[in-house]
Amino acid sequence: MKFPEAGRAYPVTLPDGSAHPGTVFLDQVIDHPNFAVGAYSYASDFDPPVDWAAHLAPYLFAGGPDRLGIGRFCQIAHGVRFITSGANHAMDGATTFPFPIFDPEQIGTYRPDSRDTVIGHDVWLGYGAIVCPGARIGNGVIVGAGAVVRGVVPDYAVVMGNPATVVRMRFEPDKVAALLAAAWWDWPLDRIKEAVPALISGDLGALD
């Protein structure tokens, strides 16, 4: 089995030898000071954008107080959006209208929300999922198509719906603990390559 090349922007090669333009390794195409993404995490889109950072996280502003962090080996389907903290309005006054953003001298002071959004390793975000400001999605999570995720999602949960709720856990607690202890996404590349058959077959015992 051929292992994907980490340094390629377009890692999927079609049968005719051409690169599939709709799938990218995000660490190769994103240059944004507030957007950190680990190796091998990819996004796919039927209408590939020029600016993947703005496409995925349109409210993540360079120099803003919030950050978006995505781990290694994540999978992001078409239509996924990260609605980061820069999208929020102040809600503690008599109005939510953001008057300061219309004043050039005050626009930089209007920061009602500074929570970071953090996505763990080996997370699959399904078609059209929305991740809300401050969400913390654990390792190995599966987010169902169209889900609206907020708050904390535990490791290896499957979440669906609006608001997204845990519909089941992927593994029993002891297996989740073993996977987190193994942290295969941090292994040296050669070890990961050797473990691919076990990883895709679910042979957790082979990961020791």
Image (cartoon, rainbow, N blue to C red):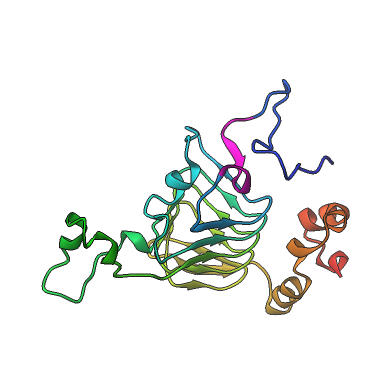
In x, y percent, where is residue 70?
57, 59
Q: Residue at x 63, y 51 (%)?
A: 41
- Give coordinates of residue 183: x percent, y percent: 75, 68
- Drawn side of residue 58 relative to residue 77, left or right: left
Horizontal and vertical percent position of residue 177: 72, 77
Name the residue rendered at 47%, 40% in the picture: 51
Q: Which residues are magenta?
A: 20-29
Toward which corner of the image does residue 24 lie, by quadrant? top right
User: Is 23 colored magenta in this rendering?
Assistant: yes
Q: Nearer the viewer, residue 169 or 5?
A: 5
The x, y position of residue 100, in whole percent, is 18, 62
Which residue sits at x=62%, y=49%?
A: 27
Q: Is residue 125 magenta?
A: no
Q: Quadrant of the C terminus?
A: bottom right
Residue at the left extreme, as displayed = 94
In the rendered image, the vertical position of residue 9 relative to residue 114, given as above or below: above
- Total numbered labels: 0
